[in-house]
Image (cartoon, helix red, strand yellow):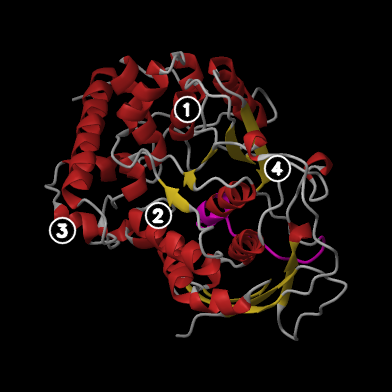
Amino acid sequence: MTEPHTRLFWLSHPDVETPPPHWQPLQDAVYWERPSRGPDRRQLFAPAPDWADDLQRVARAVFAADRYTRRVDGFDRWTRRITLSVPVAHPERWDRALHALMAVLGTVTGDLWEVVFRPLHETSVREGPFTFTAEDYAHDVALFSGGLDSLGWAAQQAALPSPRALLLVSFEERNFEALQDQVYEAVRGLRRRPVRRLVQSQTVRKPRGSGIKLERTTRSRGLLYAASAVHAAAAERIPVVHLPENGQLALNPPLSAARAGACSTRSVHPWTLHHLNRVISQVAEPGSAIRVENPFAMLTKGDVCAVARDAGLPQRVLEATLSCGTPPDRHPAGPPLAHCGLCYPCLVRRSGLLRAFGDDRTPYAANPWDLALNADRARNWHALRRWLDTEWSLLDLVADAPLPPDAEPARLVEVVERGREELRALITWAGRRAPRKAS
């Protein structure tokens, strides 16, 4: 059986171009954005170079295409075949980078992609030089999701004395903006240097009356996040972008063979970052390439929680972060719960907070050890327990995704093993809290 083939055409200037027949048009207007954050509002101290604009445009097009293509329509209800046409300022550079880009997209989404680059039609004059100097630019840029890992890095860096700013790039989580703001204000309360925040949208809308149903899995959003941080760094001449993610979730070893591939996210996996850096090096002007790094690649979730704690953040701030992979549906009564308590990211979060503080008071929608849960809702808990009861080795580390040439396999295995110990401690802790079955 042949999987359906989706063709999507990104329009940078809808008044100039018309998509070919049988191609779905996409453009910036599909992103829901507040007027105060529109493209005409300057949020950076310098314009980004062409190659960084191209990277951000490609990432926005990929994410929109991801949302517009349903997995349930594929032959296996997961894998999709997507062709995407994107205008870029330098198509010849992007053609050279195509192999590396395909490796990134295949790793993070598990789909079959074909990306075609065409010349960008400029309809406006680019901005001239700004009056700011290099001293006004930020010195560090990092992704700031509002999660525990990005909070730990931001708190650590904000506490370092410096006259140069820390720039945090965020994507708004609908319904949870107040939590993100609360966590950001906690970082600003620690600051011994200027801290700035650039907030963008990841909400894709379908045309009214189109009948289109959006895909929910959004595996490509990690590329959107990284590209936006690189775009900001390129504008303010920052050579390194930090994407903080603990080593457990960055490697994200599948709990079973059925969860291999994109069923476990790979957005900050070493293989993904390796190829993303290859893309950047091939499309950037000589001497202007930016490197994307994970500063927490060798830390467990418990280590990251300890970093945030030692930077001066109280436990209640860490418990206000966003970690859930499948947040509960919002109900009219009461504030929305940010955590289901049952998905794998929630389980790792629980183990990290338990390691750093001895308990976790986060309000979860459910507890995985609750005997009243049906098998489907408790499947991650049971898969985790089976995984922790099996031996795990270097071969398991590379069974699902390769490692780049500069990786340190022994250290990565050690990170996963320490993370497994934290998860075992969570199971022991939960066993003391769970009610016993009646004999």
Q: Residue 192, how many percent across, how many down?
A: 54, 18
Front label number (2 vs 1): 1
Measure the C-alpha gap from mark 3 to mark 1: 35 Å
Quick one: label 3 or label 4, which is nearer the N terminus?
4
Q: Which residue is mark 4?
A: 44
Residues at discs 2 and 4 in contact (Cβ within 8 Å): no
Q: Give me the disc on residue 266.
A: 2
Q: Residues within 10 Å of mark 1 (few under 14, many from 20)?
A: many
Q: Which residues are magenta?
A: 208-225
- Residue 35: image quadrant is top right
Depth check, mark 3 against mark 1: the one in front is: 1
* Marks 2/1: CA–CA distance: 25 Å
Real-space CA distance between mark 2 and mark 4, rounded to the nearest whole angstrom: 29 Å
Q: What residue lies at 51% left-to-right and 58% top-to-bottom?
A: 289
Q: Which residue is mark 3?
A: 395
Q: Nearer the viewer, mark 3 or mark 4?
A: 4
Q: Is residue 293 left or right of residue 434?
A: right
**Residue marked by disc 1:** 157
Q: Secondary structure at mark 3?
A: helix
Q: CA distance from mark 3 to mark 4?
A: 44 Å
Question: Tags 2 and 3 in contact by the CB under 8 Å rule?
Answer: no
Q: Amino acid at mark 4?
A: Leu
Quarter of the rendering occupied by the C terminus:
top left
